[in-house]
């Protein structure tokens, strides 16, 4: 190739630097980009907005970080936690405009679920600080976990329950769990109550934090890949009132996330 003295496009160079820095860090906020690249924050803001508009990056609600779009690195048909978070983010924004209480999306892990995105920062309710990203949620003691357990296959649920079952379990806890799953399926959403006796990381917290939650699964081809919830203060709203007012919006958000994930899988 013959080298020629051709001027480069400075704005494009800077945009590529920003994209490379976000890729290198696997996510960065505006201040971190400012320190790393020495560019004014106003300039950086225009660049990240442009990169996001063209699908190269997205901004997580939970902490404001800019992350590489999962679509740029898809190598299989498996949907990743990052893709779920990216797909959920705009729908959580819309949900925050319809419901005055915060929501979170969590994905399954071996013995817990992990929050991957939340709209809590948009609502700024200090009494309900959902998250941060990476927070672990109980399968047994949260509506989010129960929604997932009620939607997954019996084989997957049995494997999860085996990891959670106490050594001295006498069968009562397992029967109660079966009843909870049956009720959840029948009514179409999960709640925190009634409490379950098996202890884990959230066993005491759900009894003491003054919150209530409802949740539904996010499905892909009929199988759950995540759960989405709404959480409120018990002293401020009755469960029946929140369900009546906001269950439809919660289910609609779950369906929209599911639709986006299905489209990503189809074009991936």
Image (cartoon, rainbow, N blue to C red):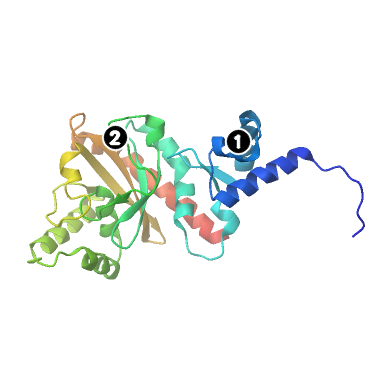
- Residue 79 to residue 48: above or below: below
Residue occupied by mark 2: 128
Left or right: where does residue 29 sit relative to residue 160?
right
Left or right: where does residue 147 sit relative to residue 13?
left
Q: Residues within 10 Å of mark 2 (few under 14, many from 20)?
A: some
Tell which of 144 and 182 is nearer to you.
144
Residue 80 is situated, as x and y percent measured from the top left of the image, at: 46, 58
Which residue sits at x=19%, y=44%?
A: 206
Residue 35 is situated, as x and y percent measured from the top left of the image, at: 59, 37
Tell which of 257 and 196 is nearer to you.
196
In which image quadrant can residue 100 be found? top left
Residue occupied by mark 1: 34
- Rendered-image quadrant of the C terminus: bottom right
In which image quadrant can residue 91 be found? top left
Left or right: where does residue 50 sit relative to residue 213?
right
Which numbered disc, 1 or 2, marks the residue that appears first in the sequence? 1
Which residue sits at x=32%, y=63%?
A: 110
Tell which of 31 and 150 is nearer to you.
31
Which residue sits at x=86%, y=42%?
A: 7
Q: Is residue 240 at all visible to an observer of this figure?
A: yes
Q: Is residue 247 at all visible to an observer of this figure?
A: no
Q: Residue furthest bottom?
A: 155
Residue 94 is situated, as x and y percent measured from the top left of the image, at: 43, 36
């Amino acid at each position: 190739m013959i080298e020629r003295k051709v001027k480069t496009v400075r704005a494009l160079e800077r945009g590529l630097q920003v994209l490379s820095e976000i890729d290198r860090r696997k996510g960065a906020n505006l201040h971190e980009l400012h320190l790393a690249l020495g560019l004014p924050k106003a300039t950086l803001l225009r660049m990240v907005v442009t990169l996001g508009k063209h699908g190269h990056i997205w901004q997580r609600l939970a902490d404001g970080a800019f992350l590489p779009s999962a679509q740029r690195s898809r190598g299989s048909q498996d949907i990743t936690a990052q893709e779920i978070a990216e797909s959920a983010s705009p729908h959580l924004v819309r949900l925050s405009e319809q419901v005055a209480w915060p929501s979170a999306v969590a994905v399954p892990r071996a013995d817990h679920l992990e929050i991957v995105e939340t709209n809590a920062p948009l609502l700024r309710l200090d009494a309900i600080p959902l998250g941060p990203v990476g927070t672990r949620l109980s399968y047994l003691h949260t509506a989010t976990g129960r929604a997932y357990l009620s939607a997954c296959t019996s084989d997957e649920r049995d494997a999860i329950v085996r990891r959670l079952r106490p050594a001295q379990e006498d069968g009562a806890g397992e029967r109660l769990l079966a009843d909870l799953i049956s009720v959840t399926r029948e009514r179409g959403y999960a709640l925190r109550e009634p409490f379950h006796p098996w202890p884990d990381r959230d066993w005491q917290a759900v009894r003491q934090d003054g919150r209530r939650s409802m949740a539904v699964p996010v499905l892909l081809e009929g199988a759950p890949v995540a759960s989405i919830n709404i959480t409120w203060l018990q002293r401020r709203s009755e469960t029946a009132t929140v369900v009546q007012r906001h269950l439809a919006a919660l289910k609609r958000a779950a369906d929209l996330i599911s639709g986006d994930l299905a489209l990503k899988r189809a074009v991936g």
